[in-house]
């Protein structure tokens, strides 16, 4: 009986191993298909804003402003555009969605939420040089 139990355990282990390998390769293929493509790059300064500094939760897109959401304000990019903001001082980056308009101070190209500024490591500093990459998706052939 011990030998039968050992055989059953080996068979179950093999099934689990095979199924986990199959799902891993599918996940890798899905990630490759959804890889964002950089459409354009901008360099300048970023600052942060919050519900308090914005004077409320209303944004130009109609979306509610949340201090910790990965969202941002840009002067010209269409609402809903995804961009990767990279802090040029420490190399940290985050993908945010454009939901608002601004900033309106010369030299600044993007305002991120205070939560994004914290994750990017510049909330205490206030303003930092950044690279902003406008993202799109590679269209899969199929």
Image (cartoon, helix red, strand yellow):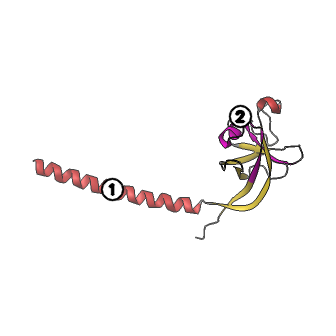
The C terminus, quarter of image: bottom right
Q: Taking 8 as reference, is 61 left or right? A: right
Q: Taking 70 as reference, is 16 left or right? A: left
In the rendered structure, find residue 67 and report the number of the disc placed on it.
2
Q: Position of residue 82 (x, y in %)?
A: 71, 52
Q: Is residue 26 magenta?
A: no
- Give SS at disc 1: helix
Using the numbered discs, state the Cα–Cα distance from disc 2 to disc 1 in whole angstroms: 43 Å
Q: Is residue 137 above or below residue 62?
A: below
Q: Taking 5 as reference, is 109 left or right? A: right
Residue located 76% across and 61% down the image: 40
Residue located 85% across and 49% down the image: 75
> Local crowd at mark 1 within 10 Å, few (<14), some, or many (≥20)?
few
Residue located 60% across and 59% down the image: 34
Residues drawn in magenta: 107-131
- Give SS at disc 2: loop
Q: Position of residue 122 (x, y in %)?
A: 72, 40
> Local crowd at mark 2 within 10 Å, few (<14), some, or many (≥20)?
some
Name the foreground residue: 20 vs 46.
Answer: 46
- For marks 2 and 1, the one nearer the N-term is 1
Q: Is residue 112 magenta?
A: yes
Residue placed under numbered mark 1 in the picture: 17
Name the foreground residue: 1 vs 54.
Answer: 54
Query: Residue at the front extreme?
Result: 89
How many numbered discs sit on the rendered protein?
Answer: 2
């Amino acid at each position: 009986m011990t030998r039968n139990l050992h055989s059953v355990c080996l068979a179950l282990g093999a099934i689990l191993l095979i199924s986990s390998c199959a799902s891993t390769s599918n996940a890798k293929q899905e990630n490759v298909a959804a890889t964002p493509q950089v459409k354009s790059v901008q360099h300048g300064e970023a600052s942060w804003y919050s519900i308090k500094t914005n004077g409320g939760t209303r944004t130009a897109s109609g979306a509610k402003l949340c201090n910790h959401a990965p969202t941002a304000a840009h002067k010209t990019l269409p609402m809903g555009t995804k961009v990767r903001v990279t802090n040029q001082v420490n190399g940290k980056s985050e993908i945010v969605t454009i939901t608002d308009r601004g900033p309106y101070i010369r030299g600044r190209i993007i305002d991120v939420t205070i939560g994004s500024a914290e994750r990017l490591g510049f909330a205490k500093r206030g303003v930092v040089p950044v690279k902003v990459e406008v993202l799109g998706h590679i269209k899969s052939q199929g």
